[in-house]
Amino acid sequence: MAIWKWKAVDEHGKKHQGIWVEKDWINVVYYLRKQQLYPFKIKRSLAVSIVNLLFSVNDKLYWANTARKFSLLLDAGIPLLAALDIIRDKETSPVRKNQWQKVSLKLQAGEDLSNSFTDFSPRPGAFFESMLKAGEKTGTLNLSFHDIAEQLEEEYFFEKKIKSVLFYPLLLLFICLLEIYVLSVFVIPMYQDLFANLNIELPFITQVLFIIGSFIPYFLLSIPVIFIIFRKFKRINLLNILGTKKILKYKDLLQFCTLLERLLNAGISLLASLQILEKIFNDRKVLRLIAQLKQAIQEGRGVAAVILTDTLFPAEIGKMLAIAEESGRLSQMLGHIANMFRKELDQELKKYSKILEPILVLVMAGLIGVVAIGVLLPIFDVSVYIK
């Protein structure tokens, strides 16, 4: 999608101008003509694109706030089109204001709201659109918007919490790598030249330090390339390297259970809900589980049997779901399981920050200590020899 600045006149010769988001200028002309506007200047705007990119709000938070506003407006008895106009008028971004205008035009043309976000960038996602579709069918659009807001807000704040927990360890890791680079490029070579000129026998630890130090700069510079190669072929995640595998697992399980619960409560069938989840997740293990669940449902089997044999979920979860399936309370049980994973995730985040930060501090101190010992030992030997 590109951002186009346009100028046009109406039937009375009055000039209008604005911004439109489209793939090419022909589509801009099409939409303007539908509004009885006759463009005389259309220009692609790079400056607006850059400003929009720099000052854009987190997509998940934006759609959570938008869904919350729609829910409140519809609860207040305001018609959908009027609510849409209020959302558009309150929008501060000219690009998004234009996109809401396009959604409004599609609604006026008779399209469903759930199908009106195809040109929106970024799109709200499969969960958002599916919940709207269910709300339109059941006449509970306000409740659908409320559930969407609750779900997206929870996902956003958990992601924010994970990032805040990881920030300090990542900062320490960066400082640690920077420290190693500075020592290997500036400090160690200086002492290596000094001891070479003195022509003294170096202790074993100093020799090892100098040998390793000569390779470290090349190794550190090659880390990004190695990471990209491994990520491409082995799908290795930096966060997994930092020991967050369990945190990411609980995050995926929590999201899986909460999304599936909300989709089922919205009246969407289990098979259709799994097809929606397939579009949301990227993790291979979760996608494999979803594929197995879909196959089981198509064969007339329950979800509990699949989850019992899968290693992603703890064993007790499969037993809980088996009881829920028999009693016809699958969505309620998913809600209880989600609460369990929510608490587990909170505990893992607290434990992670308590364990990793001291380890990284000790590693940094250890590196400085090893370099100091390796450098000071020969100096001590020289001072003794001089005496």
Image (cartoon, helix red, strand yellow):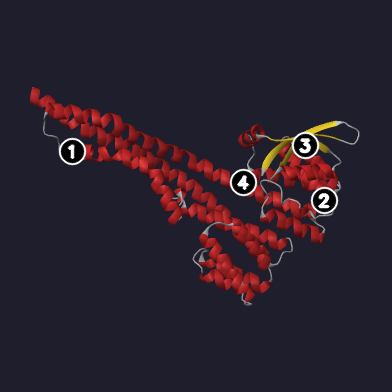
Describe the element under mark 2 as helix, strand or loop: helix
Q: Position of residue 344 (x, y in %)?
A: 53, 54
In whole angstroms, how far apart are the C-alphas of marks 4 and 2?
29 Å
Q: Secondary structure at mark 4?
A: helix
Cα distance between the residues tagged 4 and 1: 51 Å
The residue that appears at 58% across and 65% down in the rendered structure is 290
Amino acid tagged 3: Lys
Decide which of tag 3 and tag 1 comes sooner along the chain.
Answer: 3
Q: Quadrant of the C terminus?
A: top left
Residue 107, disc: 2
Query: What percent of the width, then of the height, locates residue 313?
Result: 53, 64
Q: Residue at x 76, y 52 (%)?
A: 116
Classed neighbour count for the residue bearing mark 3: other residues with Cα under 10 Å, few (<14), some (14–19), many (≥20): few
Query: Considering the image in quadrants, where does the N terminus appear?
Result: top right
Going from N to C along the chain, the mark reached first, 3 or 2, is 3
Which dot marks residue 90? 3
Q: Which kind of residue does numbered mark 1 sit on?
A: Gln
Q: Which residue is mark 1?
A: 207
Residue where numbered disc 4 is placed: 156
Tell which of 82 and 249 is nearer to you. 82
- Kind of residue indicated by mark 2: Leu
Contact (Cβ within 8 Å) of mark 4 with mark 1: no
Mark 1, other Cα within 10 Å: few <14 / some 14–19 / many ≥20: some
